[in-house]
Image: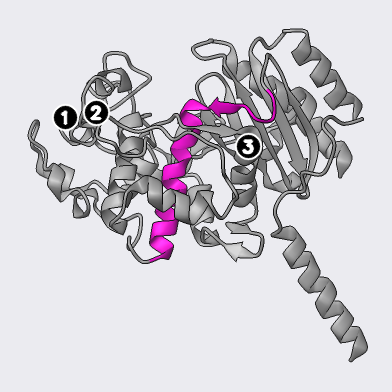
Amino acid sequence: MNKLIVVFFVYLFSIQNACSQLDFTSPSGTSHPLLSKMDSTIKSGKYERITSVLVAQNGELLFENYYNGADSNSKHNTRSATKTMATLLTGIAIKQGYIQSEKDKIFKYLGHKTPVKNPDDRKSGITLEDLLSMSSILECNDFNSYSRGNEERMYVIEDWTGFLVDLPVRAYPFEPKPEDQPYGRAFSYCSAGAAAMADIVQRAVGMPADQFAKQNLLDPLGFEDYVLHYTPEGVLNTAGGSEYKSRDLLKLIQLCLNKGVWNGQEIIPAAWLQKATTPKVRVRDGVEYGYLFWLRSFGENQQHYSYHMSGNGGQKLLAIPELNAVMVITTTNYGNRNAHNYTDELVNEYIVPALTDQQ
């Protein structure tokens, strides 16, 4: 009986420890030669405007350094990396019963935004999942400057959700139709769709999306000093933006690795995060997409599967479940063609090999 009690408490401690908040008591930096080399290389200016790199494994902070005038109190605009906030808030709304599922039709919540332009009965079938997976039938492509739904055309309009629902239905002249693609979907990167998710959430929960986020996500994680960005109509901007400290960003991706549990409290259902980080659409060879999460592998021979939040400038909030590791890389390399190559190289050449050695 005594042995059983001991085993029980060891098990209980291991569960609590796995779900605990990050240990930020470790000193900045690390003695691992690869991470020390990375630190020196960043300071040399090779990767231009990197502002912070944080790496944690098994809940312990292994590396934390700031560059180019940033420090631990700096707040970083990670651009589209914060699109994934819409996914997390949707999961919380589903948990609390405000949204039935990602299969819900968007106009269940956007009845006040009936399309005025380009009416089409097929629009009534658009689901939350279509917006979360960047694969709706709407002609919206930020990667195509000629697209009617390109984000630059949205930003000069006050009503972003109206902009989205008024878009025409897309054709597929240069790619296979959704039914001929993996997962039955065609990827098209659409900031307007991600922005509309905040409107949907706040209509579903009956309070402003920023208040819902604060009460159910930011406060439980201990976020205190941050700057939220809004659409022209005053809705939380989940197309991107908002500014957070690097340690808080690390908490956010660690929460995902913890399967939605923080300090013993379930914040987001594990089943929702599993869905969100499972491929829903093929972006290109080696890269897939979940619910506003990018999915690809890193390391030697690209052998370590990851999911991550990503933004302009090479921003990354990245989890590698196999290594029980998370990392945050922030930059101000906005618009730099090499920005994502820079941060990919940091992950592939330095961070993942060092984490593999730590195991």
Q: Amino acid at mark 3?
A: Leu
Residue at point 28% right, 57% down? 206
Mark 1 crowd level (few <14, some 14–19, many ≥20, 10 Å Cα): some
Q: What is the quadrant of the C terminus in the image?
A: top right
Range covered by the magenta-colored residues: 71-96
Q: Residue 114, position in %: x, y?
A: 11, 43
Q: Secondary structure at mark 1?
A: loop
Contact (Cβ within 8 Å) of mark 3 with mark 2: no
Residue at point 50% right, 21% down? 312
Q: Nearer the viewer, residue 84 or 349?
A: 84
Q: CA distance from mark 2 to mark 1?
A: 6 Å
Residue 8 forms part of the magenta stretch: no
Q: Quadrant of residue 231?
A: top left
Badge 2 or badge 1: first in the primary sequence: 2
Residue at point 61% right, 33% down? 245
Q: Which residue is mark 1?
A: 168
Residue at point 40% right, 52% down? 212
Q: Nearer the viewer, residue 290 or 36?
A: 36
Give the color scheme: rainbow, by chain, secondary structure or one colour. Answer: one colour
Q: Which residue is mark 3?
A: 318
